[in-house]
Amino acid sequence: MPKIHIDKSIFINKKPAEVYSKLNDFEHWKSWSPWLILEEEVKVTIAKDGKYYEWLGDITGSGNMTVLKEEKNKSIEYNLTFLKPWKSVADVAFLLKEEGEGTRVHWTMNSKLPFFLFWMKKMMIAYVGMDYDRGLNLLKDYVEDGKVHSKLDIKGYGSIEGYNYVGFKTECPLDQMGDRMRVDFEKLMPFMKVENSDKISGNAFSIYHEWDPIKNKVSYTAGVPISTPPNELLEGMITGTIPSSKCFSVVHNGPYRHAGNPWSALYSRQRAKKFKLNKRVHPMEVYMNSPKDTSENDLKTEVIFPIL
């Protein structure tokens, strides 16, 4: 049977005892779980001693988790059982190691796929790994600040009005996207706001033409809507059109480091067959305010999936 191993880590600026206390009691998981944040309506049942919990959701499926073994302030081992959308089990653990003034936290999972699903191995490692990264970022907020700085507003069904845009199209490794996109917008926005402010007709956005976490590859356009095109374009700048479409969208409130949460909320609903993607129109993020105009924790981003 194909084996799956995942190991993700993060540095948390608190001592191991403070991290440990948030991991060995499932009451705390309700505040930072990367899966529970996707669906407010999910039903969670937790044992009185905090060592067992089960969940039942329309989007997140169902399952349970049990604390099996604890080494105070050092490690916790769990048994994880998924019941829906399919049955599987996994061994999960947190490993804590003091690092400077804080703690290096490793979150691991070992599991197996049925042989006939061998083709899903790389996909499972990639997507569960991204869930672990999302969760560790939320855990860091929770331990360091006492709350997570990520909130989802499920706007649901709506529509996109078609418009023209200018921008820069980039292909790069997924793990370089943040730096590359920052460079693109640092070229685009001063040019538009200073020299062509009268031509801007909406908020800046990113269109995702390709997103492949398995191959660590992304193709995107950093753009801004326009009423009329600039008289001259910067080197490498492109023009394009976003067609009108029905859509399903989620608004994220919080730092961009948590941007994976609205995307996961939408993909989980797609997998649950709440809508069918319109593959002729690409998914996009619309930046509803600017880091220069507000605090990082108050950023708003709308992630939009075109649907049929």
Image: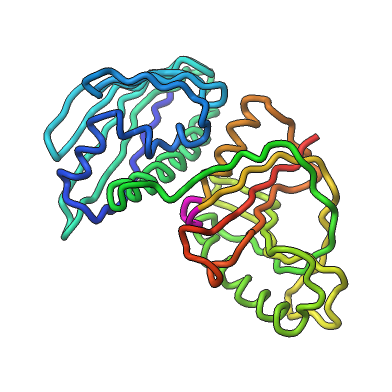
The image quadrant where one finds the N terminus is top left
From which residue to which does the magenta span run?
Answer: 254-258
Magenta span: helix, strand or loop, mainly?
Answer: helix
Q: Is residue 33 above or below residue 141?
A: above
Image coordinates of residue 44 in percent, x first then y, are 41, 22
- 27 relative to 280 in the view: left or right: left
Quarter that holds the C terminus: top right
| Residue 263: image location, x then y, percent | 58, 43
Question: How many tags in the picture?
Answer: 0
The one nearer the camera, 86 or 224, is 224
Residue 114 shows in the view:
yes
Magenta-colored stretch includes residue 112: no
Q: Is residue 240 toward the left or the right of residue 276 in the image?
A: right
Residue 47: x %, y % from top left:
28, 18
Residue at image coords 46%, 42%: 130
Is residue 1 visible from the viewing direction of this image? no
Q: Quadrant of residue 128?
A: top left
Instruction: Locate residue 177: give its quadrant.
Output: bottom right
What percent of the width, then of the height, locates residue 278? 78, 39
Question: Residue at the location (82% across, 55% down)?
Answer: 242
- Above or below residue 191? Residue 224 is above
Q: Residue, x 47% and y 62% (percent of image)?
A: 296
Q: Between 147 and 264, which is closer to the camera in this rendering?
A: 147
| Along the line of sight, the residue nearer the viewer: 29 or 293 | 293
Q: Is residue 258 above or below residue 121?
A: below
Residue at (27, 32) in percent of width and height: 93
